[in-house]
Amino acid sequence: MNPNSEYSIDRDLEKWKAYAKEIHSRNIVKSGSDETFYTFAQSSAERGSHSWIANLPLNRDKVLEIGAGGGEHIEFEKGKMNLKNYTALDIDKNFLNIISQRYPDVDLVESKADKTPFEDSTFTTIIAHGVLEHISSLDSTLQEVSRILKDDGKFVVLVPANGNFTINLFKLLVTYPSLKIRGIKRPSYIWHFENANSLTRIQVYLEKNFLIEKTVSLPFKALPRFLSPLIGYVCSKK
């Protein structure tokens, strides 16, 4: 067998990283005719969830977003608060560079979410939009969030309903074909590499570390949970 024809997860991951950077840049540079259906559909599904968080009656005196990506959520918060009080944390400096281009007032921190450089009880609100599903060190991350959250603060979480009917259908009809178009040979490998946690696992660990005050189906609150693509949580410290 020709060794060059053998599958390489590393090659697929490199192609995925380049694609992810494009996706997270979409709120700065419109991709026009090159925009894929995956990016369009993802943006449409997320818009309602960003608005839901931005419209919550939260104390925005000191806000941290973990796994901030390209700053998609910041666009929805900029009219609600002084962005000098907003901190964006991500492990990828490329994403932080994207944020700095459009939101120069935002404080940028390159760090893992399970071991941050912040003091105890620093933030009035902590946001995790579309990130907990990717974190393998979920329990230690949530313990760290609890440590740096003020006693009367809120932890707001938005996660895809990984494992339910709608997400599985979207994955098969949209995500996998879109990744194939990008030259990724085994989209299922990339999906499982990037998605460490199901919705159920995330909720178990949220309940372990926080009091869940509210659970919402998004972008349509009337959808039953098994059909909802996104689930939002508002949590407080125990």
Image (tube, grey):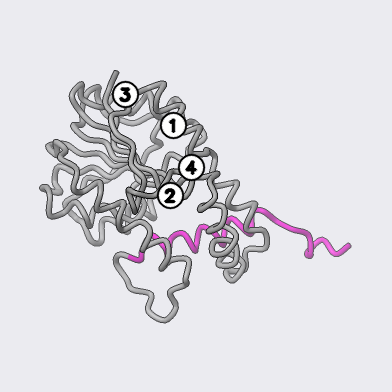
- Residue at 20 percent across and 25 percent down: it is 150
Mark 4: amino acid = His
Most prominent secondary structure in the magenta stretch?
helix
Say which residue label 1 marks.
203
Q: CA distance from mark 3 to mark 4?
A: 22 Å
- The answer to whether the residue labelled 4 contacts the one labelled 2, judged by CB atoms less than 8 Å apart, is no
Residue density around tag 3, few if under 14, some if 14–19, many if 20 or more, within 10 Å: some
Residue numbers of the magenta segment = 1-26
Q: CA distance from mark 4 to mark 2?
A: 19 Å
In front: mark 1 or mark 2?
Answer: 2
Question: Residue 19 magenta-drawn?
Answer: yes
Say which residue label 3 marks.
211
Q: Furthest-bottom residue in view?
A: 33
**Left or right: where does residue 12 sit relative to residue 41?**
right
Q: CA distance from mark 2 to mark 3?
A: 22 Å
Q: CA distance from mark 1 to mark 4?
A: 14 Å
Mark 1: amino acid = Gln
**Left or right: where does residue 187 sit relative to residue 231?**
right
- Residue at 22 percent across and 45 percent down: it is 107
Mark 3: amino acid = Leu
Dot label at residue 233 = none
